[in-house]
Structure formats: structure tokens, C-alpha cells
Image (cartoon, coloured by chain):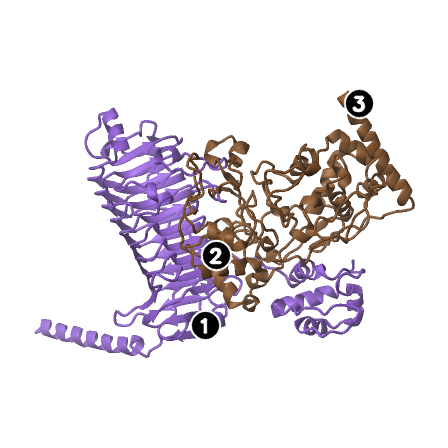
Amino acid sequence: MKKFIFIAFILVLTAGGWRYYTGETKTKVVTLCNTCPPGFERTDDNRCRFRSLYQMYETKDGNNPGVGGLKTALPAVRDGFTPQQIDLGRYLFFDPALSADGTISCASCHQPDKGFSDGLPTSVGIKHTSLKRAAPSLWNVAFNKRFFWDARASTLEEQMTGPLYSPEEMGTTPEQLHNTLNNLPAYRDLFRQAFPQKNNDRIELSEVYTCIAAFEATLISLNSRYDQYAHGYAEALTKNEIEGLNIFRSFVARCTECHTPPLFTNQQVAVIGLAEPDHTFDVGAAKTFHDPTLKGAFKVPSLRNAALTAPYTHSGRFEKLEDMIAFYTKGRGHEVPPTEKLRIHWHIWEPHLRHDEIDRLADFIHTLTDESFKPQTPEWLPSGIKMETKQPGNSLSLNQP
Amino acid sequence: MKIVVRIFVLLITLAGGIYLGKVFFGRGSTIPAPVPTYFNAAGAAGDSSAIGAGVVTGQTYNIKPGQSIQDAVGKAKPGDLIRIFPGVYHETIYIDKDNISIQGVIEEGEWPVLDGEKKLNDAVLYSGNGVLVENLKIMNYKGNGIMGQAGNNYIIRNNWIVGSGVYGIFPQFGKNGLVERNILTGIEDAAIYIGMCDNIDVRFNEVYGNVAGIEIENSRHALVEYNYAHDNTGGILAFLTPGLPIKTCADVIIRNNFVYHNNTKNFGAVGSTVSHIPKGTGVLVMAADDVTIENNIITGNSNSGITITDYAFAGINHANDPESEPNPDRLTLLDNFMDNNGTDPIDEVKALKKATFSKPGLDIIAAGGGTGNCIINPDRYITIGLNKYANCSAHDTHLVKSYMLDKPVLPRNTTSIEKGKMTYYGVCSGCHAYNTRLIGPPVSVIQAMYKGNAKGIVDFITKPVHKRDDYPEMPPQNYLSEETRQAVAEYILTVQK
């Protein structure tokens, strides 16, 4: 019976999708973009290769890339997708057809105008389900080695199957997603463009994952005023901001020890001793690694574009950067419930930061803002679901027929 | 008679020497620039491909009390020398450019003193390559004395650091460095802390009255020799700390050091790694691999002369790291002079001694896991836990003279075309595409306007003037170096897709 309802639901949904497609956009023929997005060079084999001034600091025999100081090379990047795959990924990313009931897209929780987060303490999934953790920003995910707050995925492709198939988030299933997309002729056409070597007409889920990963990996933010300073232009930062940088890297505040340049994360998990807003303790990475010593450990988030992604922490505890910074100076373990024994990171101590030092740190974090490569939101979706662009905030809604 | 003549000649020679010395080295004479030792000719002046620290090819700035050292750093260009004359300075010096030398001038026993007055965080921060810091007395800072983040080819020598915060000298993420002839005391963590570095020599330093004297952490190819580590809580340490982005600590040679009486009560900050070190620790190896301990004098350390441990026994209560292997493997314990260690061990060690019926005193204790470890002449010492240690086939490390590189780490040789390409795609492509209009006009249009005129592009992007009403005004790109602007202008004229 359940199965029957499910199949019926799929049929209704795909029929609906078909109707949008045939009814409203019958004549729509879209050619996927054949140029690479900003930050990428299209090479002769039609691949988009990452280019950045940070590549000047790559040395064969030098120090390790990815962690260090101002002029340090970046860690390995996910690139080499085709312009067409990236562009198709962009459509998929914004398309609510990927959720069980056509209401939620990747962009619902990762909104371009909110630093690819959603401005909420914790995100809201399908049917207004309140979720346990905050949506992390997607800027510079091309460099990430681990994904999710608890570090439980190691590729973008693996990561996206989490929200797609979580009953609380996008709520779909591999079968449903496969059927939905294959029943939309516009997508069948676009996937043929993105995978021209295909010898059949069926969209494979692996191709869906590839395209979304391709798009996400183009969200590069490395042209902030801080970067201008790092590349050698001392005037890029004000006196206050430089003071903030020096506090940031000093061994009193110790911010750089975990939020290490150039990505402003060392990509490790750390226990910093946060209480939860609703008193149910989140064990974090302890579950991922089956290791109780990692209880309460979470991935160190990048601070790039952090000024755009309030509120902060995995559970959205702090509204302002200043409040987040103040957490670190209120004493080691000051929030830990007495019933929890946590192995708090050794860099969490009592730096006794003054108010003006907290302000300077916030000033500095603002210099890490750069959205110059922000992608265009599509005006049309292959599923036929209408994009509503005028409404501020959550810009997507299902156009009821 | 002959003797009188001899003494007379000797006196004349001496007087002449003193006179000449005054002429050459006296007040007002040219004080010689720092000597960039240990680099071979490839790094010498004139070879601009890779300059080692301390190679002065440019200008000299003389800073006297009342002047700002940082102002000079701001003006300095790679290859410049900043000399700091005796007196007291209250500032944080930060060096975010390459090949800057900071040299204190010591006159008649008077040092230039950087005094943080317990208000300032750090005395010296650097991120540039080829940085030299020498002859400074640093006191009363809250964070670090001298901290480097990712600078390669550094030299930190002849500094005198007193009661200055958490770490005295702390190069982090740097390759090819020398930490030599510094004196450090009163540091509440490690006085000399080599963190996540490669190819480092730590020589001829004196560290006393600190929680940890010298700590080599998550670094590879470190030579620690001829140091005097006394009256700390722990003398010389080699650690692999879990949870850091670099996951190994290996190939460390600890030799020819004097590690004496490290019995100071632990005053480390709660939660810090070193706060777990028992007082009376001479040499401590935790989870590090391929460590050689040779020809040291290790005496009077009341807990144990040498302690070799995994995380578990060390009582380090950090969260585990699935990528970090917790056991010390392939240690080589060669001949060391050890005496009068382990006279007052901590309770855990006492219990172990009781269980093994060993006699009073303790030179070497190995606890926890680890494979491939060896020792020569174990019978000379009072030991616990060395049953599985094999006989070493190695006898000495005399072939290793230094772990520094023969020549400085080379910066990437970026051709002008590459630089132009990185800049065009890495920066310009946010607003310009080849054939389509983005925020700014298409590159094809720019090419038509500036055919054969790269300089025209350079001038425009340096100081743009608003030309077209249908496009927003372009922000100046003067933050790019002149060379980079030229490279990108030339590249823009060649873009074809």
C-alpha cells in the first residue's frame, strides 16, 4: 500500500514536471555554457582548470601547501570538470525538483546571497522540519578534504547524498531522483550535452553527482582585501585591520592555529566545548570516527566570507562575530555541561582578550569577504519549476499550476 | 733578555690589534652585516634566484630609541637590513615580506630591548621567507617572543628572551631554518618550539627555567645539538601531537646536548600539552618516529633521564586523531652519559619500578607501544621497558653535519606568461570574459582598443577612468605589483577564448 502511494506520488510529481515543461517551456532549448566560470581557464581538452595568484607559491621542495602563512600554496583542488558539467550542476543546484516534493533545492540552505548558507541557527528541511545543525558555507569547498560538521564524508559527491536522501532534508530517494530527472526531457537533453560520450539516453545518478560537485567546486573566494595584503599590497588593510590580523595570528588569541591561512581552516576536527541551545549534547565527530575522545568535536570551519554567514557554530549559537570571538575568551570549558567530560582542544585557553581586541578581530574577519566570483542564479529551471527572484531571502518557491 | 723582548713584541702587537680593532669595529665604524652561514654559494649575494636569510643586498636602516622599527619594516624591500640600536622599544614587529634582516646592535653590553610590558602579544611575527632575527633582548610579551608562520630559510640567533609568554622562539610551517645561540628563560610552554617544520638545526642554545626547554613537534629532519637544557620541567622533547594538519614527527637527532637537573615544578597553562610533563624529565619522546639520541650528558633529572612513550602512558588527554600514529617507532638510543637520574620519580613510575624490582634511580623508561626500537650498551643504565629493544646496528650519526638544506628552498619560478594567466583567470575573470559581457566589457573589445599597447592597459587598470556609461567604473588594480600588472596586460592581449 505504502509502495503504491509512493509510486503514485512519483507519477503525479513527474507528470507535474512534464506539464511544466511541455506547458510553459515547450520551445525552450538551452545550450549549456561553453566557457568556464571565473577563476578557471578552459584548456584544449575542454576542462576548466583552477587558476589563482596563490599558485605562485607552489614549490616542489618547500613547506606543505594548504596550511601556513600569507604566501602559502593552496591544498589540492577539485577541478577539471567541463564547462557544460559545471553549468548543468548550476541548474541542478537551484532546482527543487531534486527534493521529494519539489519544494527544496540545494540552494534553499546554501543561498548565494547569504554566503551559501541560510542565515538560520539551524537549517529547515522538507515540510518545515527543523534540523539539528547549521548549513555550512560552500565557498571554497573545492579544497575541502572532509565534509559535514562531523567530517563524515570525504568527497563532494558523497556529501550531497546526505541531504538529498535524508528524510528530514530533501527527502528524496535514489530511485525517485533517478525517475524524476529521466522523466524531464529538458534534463535528458542537458545531460546529453554535459556527457556527449554517452551512448544512451538515460541520466545516471553518478552524472548528477558529478555535475553538482562540478558547480560547487567553482565557488572560489580568494580575492578579498586580505588576499591583496597577503600578495604584498600593504595598503590593502587599514591600521585596525592589520592590528586585527596580528591579534589573529598571535599566540594569545591563537586563531590561526586552527583557522590557518590561506583557507582559514586547518581542516581538522576540534573540541572547543560548546553547549547546545536545547541541552541535548551533540557528540559530533565521535560518531564518525567511533571514538569517544572526539565527543563534541566538529570540523574547523573556514572563516572566508564568515562575515556573511551568521549565526555561527554548528548549532548557530552566536548572532554576531563579536559574540563568537568572545566565546574563546570566557574560559576553557565554561559552557560544558557538568555531566559531560570533554577533551577540549589545547589551544582553548583564557587569552583575556580586551573588548577592543575582539573588535579588531572582527574587523579583520570582515577583510576575508569576497564574492567577486558569485555565480548567476538561473532564471529558468529545466524542471519547469519557477524561480522566484524578486522575493528577498529564500528565493525559491513552487509555482502552483 | 730574550723573554723581555718577546713580551715587548707581544704587547706591541696586542696594542696594535686593539687600535686596529677600534678603528674597524669601534663606535661609528661600519658594523658588519649578518653572516648568512650554512648556505652554500648558490645562496650567496648576487644570485637572486634564491637568497638565504641574512643576505643583505639592499639598504640599511638604523633605528634608535624613539623611532619605530615597524616603520622601517614597512619601508624595507627584500634584501634590506634593519639595525636596532641599544635602548627600549615597545612594539610588535611583523614582517610580511621576504628577505628582511632584523639585527640588534649590542654596544658595550647594552642590548636593544623589545619590552611588551605584559600588554603586547608578540615581539616579532613573520610570514616572509629568508627572514633573519638576531641580537634582540625580548621581554614581557604575552604570546610569543619570535613566531614565524610559513617562512622558509630563516635564521633566529643570538637572541635573549626572558619571561616572554607562551613560546619563546616558535617557527611554524617553515622549511630550512636555523635556531642558534639563543638564551631563553621563564617561558610557560616551550622556550624553543619547532612546530610542523622541516630541515631545522637547533644548536648552541641555552634554555632554563621554562616548562619545556626545546620541543620538536610534528617536524621532520631536525638536528638538536650542543644545547644546554637545564632547570626546566622537561629538557628536550620530540612530540607527535594529534589533531594537527601535519601528521608525522620523524628523523630527529638529539645529540651532544647537556640535559641537566630539569626538576622545575610544572607551571604550564591548564590544558596545554606540556602541562602533563612530570618535573624531572630530561629527554621525552612521545609518539615521534626515527629519533636518535646520541652522546648527550643527561644527569640529575629526578623523574627519568630519557622517557619514551605513546600517548596513552603520557597521560596527554587530547582527543584522538585517526590519522596520527600514537607509538614511538624505530628509535635509536646510542651511547649517552647518564647519571643520577630518576631519584624522585612520579607515582606511576614508582609503581612500575616496584613491579619490576629495579634498583633506585632511573635513566631510561620506555612505556607503551612502538616497534623497531634499538639501544646499544643497555646494561650501562638503569632502565624499564627496554626488553623488546634490539641491538642497534648504527653506532653514530657523524655523517649528519646539518639537517638544513644545501641551498635555500627555491621559490617557484613563475614565468611572466604564467603570472599573467594566474592573474587574468584568478582575478580579472570575475568581471571580464572573452566574448561576452559580464560586469566589464569583453576581452575581445579590450584587445581591439589596446592592440599592441600593453602599457595602455597597465595605465588604465592602475588608475581607471570611467569611459563608458553602459559599464560601471572599474576599481583600481594597483594592489597588484607593477610586474604583475604588466604580465596580465600582456596576457590579456593574447587571450583567444
- Report x, y in % for residue B9: 16, 75
> Which chain is drawn using brown?
A
Q: What residue is disc 2 on? A: A248
The Cα–Cα distance between marks 2 and 3, rounded to whole angstroms, is 58 Å
> Which chain is drawn using purple?
B
- Report x, y in % for residue B202: 36, 52
Between marks 1 and 3 in the image, the one whose residue lies nearer the viewer: 3
Q: What residue is disc 3 on? A: A4
**The residue marked by circle 3 belongs to what chain?**
A
Circle on res. B71: 1
- Report x, y in % for residue A29: 88, 47
Whichever of labels 2 and 3 marks the residue nearer the N terminus, that label is 3
Mark 1 lies on a secondary structure that is: helix
Q: Are marks 1 and 3 on the same chain?
A: no
- Which residue type does callout 1 highlight? Asp
The Cα–Cα distance between marks 1 and 2, rounded to whole angstroms, is 21 Å
